[in-house]
Image: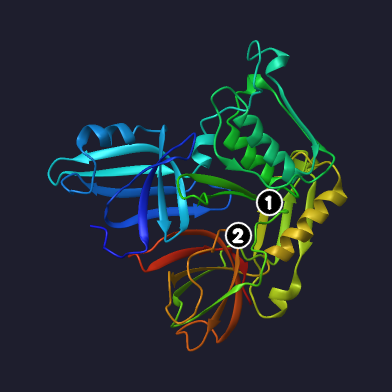
Amino acid sequence: MSDAGSPWSVWIAHTRTGRLVAELPTIGTPKWTCAVNAAGSVEVVVALGDPGVPKRDALRAMLAPVRFCLAVAYGQHLVQAGPIWTHRYTDTNATLTIGASGLWGLFERRLVLPPHYSAITDPSADLRIGPASLHSLARALVEAGESRPRADLPVVYPPEIAGTNSRIYRGFDLRPLGDALRSLGSEDGGSEVEFRPRFTEDRERLEWVMRIGAPLLAQSGAPRVYDYGAGLVAVDADTDGSNLASAVFVRGNGMERGLLTGHAVNAELVDAGYPLTEVVIGDHTSVTEQSTLDSYARAYAAMLSRPTELWSAVVRTDPGDGGPTLAGLAPGDFVVFGLDRHPWLPDGHYEQRVLGMESGEDTEHVSLTLQRELAEV
């Protein structure tokens, strides 16, 4: 059961308006995830015999999938919220497990179309956005999705940024808005996006702030500092050298004797006593210029000359010693880990970027997914 006095709470809200319907007592720790360019998730377990849980018919009505959403809060700070998709009742212990996504999950089930059109195959079904920056094209995509009949949502948008980019989305492609948004962000110079929920000032509704990077999402102030043994509970490090290469070949256009190949050698590894390793990259078979293939090969050779290292960390939601709390930490933020006497990693201060967050093993901890970095050789 949710502990009395716990800073964690779970809420049900109407998806289209954000109106809060009820606070929901839950069993154990709410499970949630949030990340850059991803839907995220929420899962909670409810005991139907709990006196604080609404009666059967009322509860069934307020858990109508998609119509209502599930939100997890840490104090006044919402960590994740979005439409309910599933609930599973287990009769042996009279519990209900409720599953939801973040708001992005709704856009995976909404197509890129203008407000009005005559037929999917007609030009009137094509959506044209721009000219604007890639940042504001992402905003325009979501605004267009909201402008369709009965498609309104409580989304708060950032200011527009001017630019010269334009896009046309053909109606007959039947493209999900979430896919188009993710694809736009993966372009060179494209912006990262996250829909961050928050309570309105009157605490009667929730809304989603559309955070758009320029192109990366990050906090406006200095990075938070987590010290090992205090706010920073654990750091795992996963080093992967399986792609190390002293030489790179890049396949270009052509076949057999007429095959174009880019080639580059990075002597740093073999000069340091590493054995020769070679990698073939086959993703550029449409390239017909030798100079282009060679430039690709040089870039790959530089990137593959060092192993990658991926850290994951567990931090306290509230260290209680003046250290940073969970409130305000969001995907995209930079943090600094102060390591002292770690069993494996050298002492020092390391800047890391948080790509995702999720519930920890209990309500006092949160797990962080960090950006993969190049390691030393």
Q: How many marks?
A: 2
| Callout 2: SS | loop
Front residue (pair 266, 33): 33
Residue sitting at 54 percent across and 24 percent down? 150
What's the amino acid at mark 1?
Answer: Ile
Q: Which residue is under mark 1?
A: 281
What's the amino acid at mark 2?
Answer: Gly
Label 2 packing within 10 angstroms: few (<14), some (14-19), many (20+): many
Vertical side of 121 occupied by 186: above or below: below
* Quadrant, the C terminus: bottom right
The span from disc 1 to disc 2 (Cα, nearest Å) is: 30 Å
Q: Quadrant location of residue 60? A: top left
Vertical side of 22 occupied by 170: above or below: above
Residue sitting at 39 percent across and 48 percent down? 42
> Which is nearer the N-term, disc 1 or disc 2?
1
Residue sitting at 72 percent across and 79 percent down? 271
Front residue (pair 261, 136): 136
Give the colour scheme of this rendering: rainbow
Residue 91 position in % (x across, y down): 14, 40
Label 1 packing within 10 angstroms: few (<14), some (14-19), many (20+): some
* Quadrant, the N terminus: bottom left
Residue sitting at 42 percent across and 78 percent down? 320
Which mark is on residue 258?
none
Task: Work out whether residue 284 can be spotted.
Answer: no
Task: Work out whether residue 75 can be spotted.
Answer: yes
196 left or right of 162?
left
Q: Which residue is under mark 2?
A: 332
258 left or right of 55?
right
